[in-house]
Image (tube, rainbow, N blue to C red):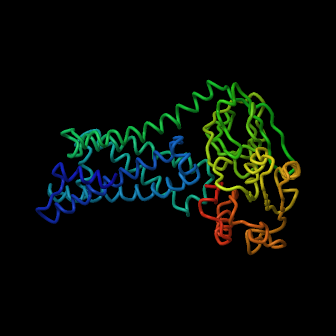
Amino acid sequence: MCAAGIALMIASGGLLAQSATDWFYTLGRALGIVAAVLMMTQVLLASRAPWVERAIGHDRAIATHARLGKLAIILMLVHAAILTTASGVYDGRSPVSQFLTWPQYGWFMLFAQIALATFTIVLITSLAAVRLRWPYERWHAVHMLVYVGVAFAVPHQFLEGSTFRTGGLSWWFWAVLWTVSIGSFVLFRLARPLVLLARHGLTVESVEPRADGSTTVTIAGRDVARLRARAGQFFLWRFLAPGLRGQSHPYSLSAAPGDRLRITVKASGDGSSRVRDLQPGTRVLAEGPLGVFTHASRSRGPIVMICAGIGITPVRSMLEEVTAGDDVTVIVRARSRDEAPLLDEVEQLCTERGARLHVLLGSRGGTWGTREQPASIGDLVEDPAGADVYICGPRAWALAVEADALGAGVSPDAVHREEFGW
């Protein structure tokens, strides 16, 4: 897409080559095109579009979205700096003077400057030094400014960019790309949750605090089966209750879906801590189902499911869908039994389904197991290379498990990793 966009720019006479300033100006335009493609790609990746979710999974889509977002914003800022400086040379002004005169070109250029300001704020707050100091809810609220920036930046591309003034193929090329990107975001991020709320009327049916500190919430509604959720998937939940309306959090199903949906939440922040205070009857906005952490992604016979902490929830729900004859190994890592959510239910399901269960209890050690029970897939699983391996837990821990699995001969396409965190 980047190459096609630059080719269309050149075809429209955008390759200036009479002076060093011309080359500099052309470079700035080319960087703007690359930044625009990256920006629309990251909007599409975060749109919850079903085909994106099925292709790469939600966690990888969001991880790619984050990487592309930083690069897109940096390129956008460089694009603006180059064009401002080059235009200043043409007009005999300093870069600062040229920047201050741009709003006089039209409302769309003023909007572009507002977009630059929002992009700058998002970039600064996305730096690890800032992000790790903020609660997720505050960071996410500021991060949403990127979509405001996109909305304010797009008009100047069509109204000021010389490539688009005459219409034609280039105009339609970019119009289609932006329509698909922004349209997917509006359809699946904004409209679909409201449609699901109206169609299914999801509400909290029961709230059950558990001894390990987690809370199990059961959600009921009309024709819940039409959501086509699968065990192992998750939804982005927005509970329409005081203190929670403005927050959307990913929680995996902790039981196989039927005419009810069940989640189990461990308190780890302001939002998750308030889940235990939910009242039956609270209305629920849901985005999903999301994720490819399901039996549908299996490519081999045996399966190995490895989890830590609240990552046990999709494993517990997938165990319900284990069929007779399935070769299943479950490995649970926790600090202690008292802190392991749903461990009693997992133990019961493993007994009923004939699954092998390894529970690794203790403090963090030199492996992805515990200090008391160091772990290696090769030691716990008879033939790991012939199995699908499902991994769910904190990012650093999950990456260690994945590396161990690959080292034990598991094929990369047989590793299914769902990570939680931000």
Residue at 45% x, 43% y is 147
In the rendered view, tell whether residue 44 sits above or below residue 258. below
Q: Is residue 352 left or right of residue 144?
A: right
- In the rendering, at what x and y percent does residue 363 appear? 81, 68
Residue 242 in which image quadrant: top right
- In the rendering, at what x and y percent does residue 50 appear? 54, 41
Nearest the eye: 392 or 106: 392
In the rendered view, tell whether residue 187 sits above or below residue 102. above
Q: Is residue 20 visible?
A: yes
- In the rendering, at what x and y percent does residue 103 appear? 27, 44
Nearest the eye: 72 or 262: 262
Q: Is residue 104 visible?
A: no
Extreme-left residue of the structure: 18
- In the rendering, at what x and y percent does residue 302 appear? 73, 57
Residue at 45% x, 50% y is 42
Residue at 29% x, 52% y is 4
Nearest the eye: 199 or 390: 390
